[in-house]
Image (cartoon, grey):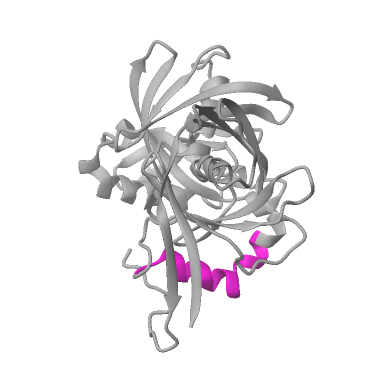
């Protein structure tokens, strides 16, 4: 009987299931992601992500070796539809997990840097500590940039203009009000429907093609409410509908990075300001421009991750639902 142990965390409400010893192959994490799309790793993803052992909004990662000695480890991020190129909330959870488990040494008071290779590049989780406890995690992303603005899209709620931004993955982003909605739990079903419409309308757009084609295509749609200004800077609420209709409960780490890049380019977020970014359930990240390169801005996103527990999943050889199922 096959058994797999996992450790479950959440970051601002979004789940992250951590799996060791997954069957992945490749010289780099980016190569491992391509290889994982078929075969044993994909079967394990389905087994641990989908019902009856998971659900349609489950998220997790397979720990892998790093690309080289410059990182502590690598990770393949996964969701109900496959393997993603980036995940900020997962990076925060992995930073807290690495410190808690002793994989990366950390002081009782101060900060530990956890360096992780992900399919979109090398990222960091700066784990902040006080009195032997983790009090916050700062996700430092790959360079992020605006790909296109004002792209017209016809939706079932009329014509809208959409921006495409890279934050480790390609996001389509627009005001929720442009489709007559607010980012509230009561509107979740309709937000999912519009998010899927816009994602698939732009997935093959030339501006969604990147030099590394493994990163191409629209990963998700970010619908935003502008809440005005907080003391630190702009205050917004968003919902990110990613993959094929999955809803991020957190403000979305790589999605927040994309919003930081867009707001910085349009002049709505100064380098000395912080984006206060709320989720559909009211949890919060803080995003800022930590630096600039020729490839784009370097976003840093601050949040917190919490351990939920550990599980041992087993596969009975006679179980007809070994591959899991989805109702969405």
- Whether residue 79 is situated above or below residue 317 in the rendered picture: above
Q: Position of residue 321 (x, y in %)?
A: 38, 80
Q: Position of residue 201 (x, y in %)?
A: 46, 50
Rendered residue at 44%/67% (across/down): 312
Highlighted range, magenta:
33-51
Rendered residue at 72%/51% (across/down): 66
In which quadrant is the C terminus drawn? bottom left
User: Nearest the camera: 280 or 198?
Assistant: 280
Q: Position of residue 211 (x, y in %)?
A: 72, 46
Q: In the orientation shown, which residue stands out farthest toward the bottom?
A: 318
- Whether residue 22 is situated above or below residue 112 in the rendered picture: below
Which image quadrant is residue 317 in? Answer: bottom left
User: Nearest the camera: 205 or 307?
Assistant: 307
Instruction: Answer yes or no: is residue 59 visible.
Output: yes
Whether 46 is among the magenta residues is yes
Rendered residue at 48%/33% (across/down): 133
Instruction: Answer yes or no: is residue 149 visible.
Output: no
Q: Is residue 78 left or right of residue 115?
A: left
Dominant SS in magenta: helix
Q: In the orientation shown, which residue stands out farthest toward the left?
A: 186
Q: Position of residue 260 (x, y in %)?
A: 52, 26
Rendered residue at 61%/35% (across/down): 106
Q: Is residue 121 left or right of residue 7?
A: right
The number of callouts visible is 0
Whether 218 is among the magenta residues is no
């Amino acid at each position: 009987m096959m058994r797999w142990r996992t450790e479950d965390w959440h970051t601002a409400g979004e789940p992250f299931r951590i799996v060791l010893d997954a069957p992945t192959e490749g010289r780099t994490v980016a190569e491992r992601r391509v290889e994982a799309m078929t075969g044993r790793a994909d079967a394990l993803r389905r087994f641990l992500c989908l019902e009856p052992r998971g659900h349609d909004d489950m998220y997790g990662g397979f720990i892998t070796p790093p690309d080289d000695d410059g990182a502590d480890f690598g990770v393949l991020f996964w969701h109900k539809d496959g393997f993603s190129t980036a995940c900020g909330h997962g990076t925060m959870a992995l930073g807290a997990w690495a410190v808690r488990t002793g994989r990366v040494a950390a002081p009782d008071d101060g900060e530990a840097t956890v360096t992780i290779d992900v399919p979109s590049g090398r990222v960091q989780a700066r784990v902040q500590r006080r009195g032997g406890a983790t009090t916050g995690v700062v996700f430092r992303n790959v360079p992020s940039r605006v790909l296109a603005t004002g792209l017209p899209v016809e939706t079932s709620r009329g014509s809208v203009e959409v921006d495409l931004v890279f934050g480790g993955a390609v996001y389509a982003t627009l005001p929720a009000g442009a489709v007559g909605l607010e980012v509230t739990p009561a509107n979740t079903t309709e937000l999912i429907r519009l998010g899927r419409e816009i994602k698939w309308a732009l997935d093959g757009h030339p501006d969604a093609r990147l030099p590394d084609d493994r990163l191409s295509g629209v990963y998700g749609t970010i619908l935003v409410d502008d809440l005005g200004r907080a003391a630190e800077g702009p205050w917004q609420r968003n919902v990110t509908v990613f993959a094929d209709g999955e809803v991020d409960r957190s403000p979305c780490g790589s999605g927040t990075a994309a919003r930081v890049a867009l707001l910085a380019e349009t002049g709505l977020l100064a380098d000395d300001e912080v984006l206060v970014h709320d989720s559909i359930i009211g949890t919060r990240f803080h995003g800022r421009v930590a630096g600039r390169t020729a490839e784009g801005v370097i976003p840093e996103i601050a949040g917190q991750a919490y351990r939920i527990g550990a599980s041992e999943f087993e596969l009975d050889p006679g179980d007809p639902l070994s591959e899991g199922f989805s109702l969405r």
